[in-house]
Image (cartoon, rainbow, N blue to C red):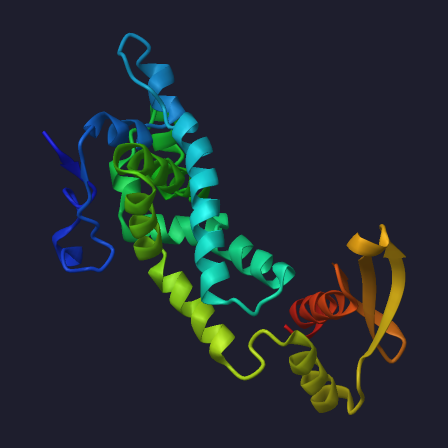
Amino acid sequence: MPSTLAMTMPASRADSPHSIKYEFANPALLTEALTHKSHVNEHKSQDRKHNERLEFLGDAVLSLIISDHLAKLFPRLSEGSLSKLKAKLVSETCLANAARRLDLGARLQLGRGEELSRGREKPSLLADALEAVIAAIYLDGGLEASRNFTLDVLSDELREVESQQAKPGGDDYKTRFQEWCQRRYDMLPRYVTVRESGPDHQKMFEVVVQIDGKVVGAGHGHSKKEAEQLAAQQALEQVAG
């Protein structure tokens, strides 16, 4: 009998865009994706598999899907900027939030120890379970099915990223940091190239950004421009908030 991800969603979420109606041809994959190692360890007599194998595969599938989506969505962003966006989208926090919207915690099969320690609410377990589900759909229905599921379940986070990038200077960290410095200190930041390495066809640059002689950010890139952008981004995150 086919198994769907939305089968046990609460009624209040029935119309949610995250109530995925994917049907598994092989329901055992969904069961495996939602089975934690602690449950298998306590039921050794049963022929059960835990989700670590699927979690491993799901991490790679998720990375491919998000990398491909971001590269197409933001063709003008540098490699460094794309990497930052991807790291945010595949972070434990984002994945756990998406898993909560799917109510995966309620569907996890846990051992008694994890139940007692409120494992259903742990961000790490929720994020791992979502990666496992992504892999299960990939194995059951192929890359396109997994892509559709992933982009849908992370649609809130993707909209936030798009909104941020659409703002004036959204991906221009140098401009944003310069404006902040002028407002805060009435001065401009200074960028200093502190190191160049690698062969001419594959140069790497290390740049620091200073305010009044104090280093407030650093960045590495294949060009001075990319390194300066990353230095400004770090400064914005650490100094300007």
- Residue at 56% of width from left, 70% of height from top? 76
Residue 133 left/right relative to 169: left
Residue that lies at the very extreme toward the front in this rendered image:
201
Q: Quadrant of residue 39?
A: top left
- Residue at 29% of width from left, 49% of height from top? 149
Q: Is residue 206 above or below residue 190?
A: above
Q: Please provide percent x and percent y for residue 80.
A: 64, 60
Q: Please provide percent x and percent y for residue 192.
A: 87, 71
Q: Is residue 202 above or below residue 50?
A: below
Q: Please provide percent x and percent y for residue 66.
A: 45, 53
Q: Please provide percent x and percent y for residue 7.
A: 14, 42
Q: Quadrant of the N terminus?
A: top left
Residue 30 left/right relative to 193: left
Q: Quadrant of residue 193?
A: bottom right
Residue 102 left/right relative to 203: left
- Residue at 30% of width from left, 56% of height from top? 152
Q: Quadrant of residue 159?
A: bottom left
Residue that lies at the very extreme toward the top in this rendered image:
45
Q: Nearer the viewer, residue 172 or 176?
A: 172
Q: Is residue 39 above or below residue 107?
A: above
Count numbered badges in the picture: 0
Q: Quadrant of the C terminus?
A: bottom right
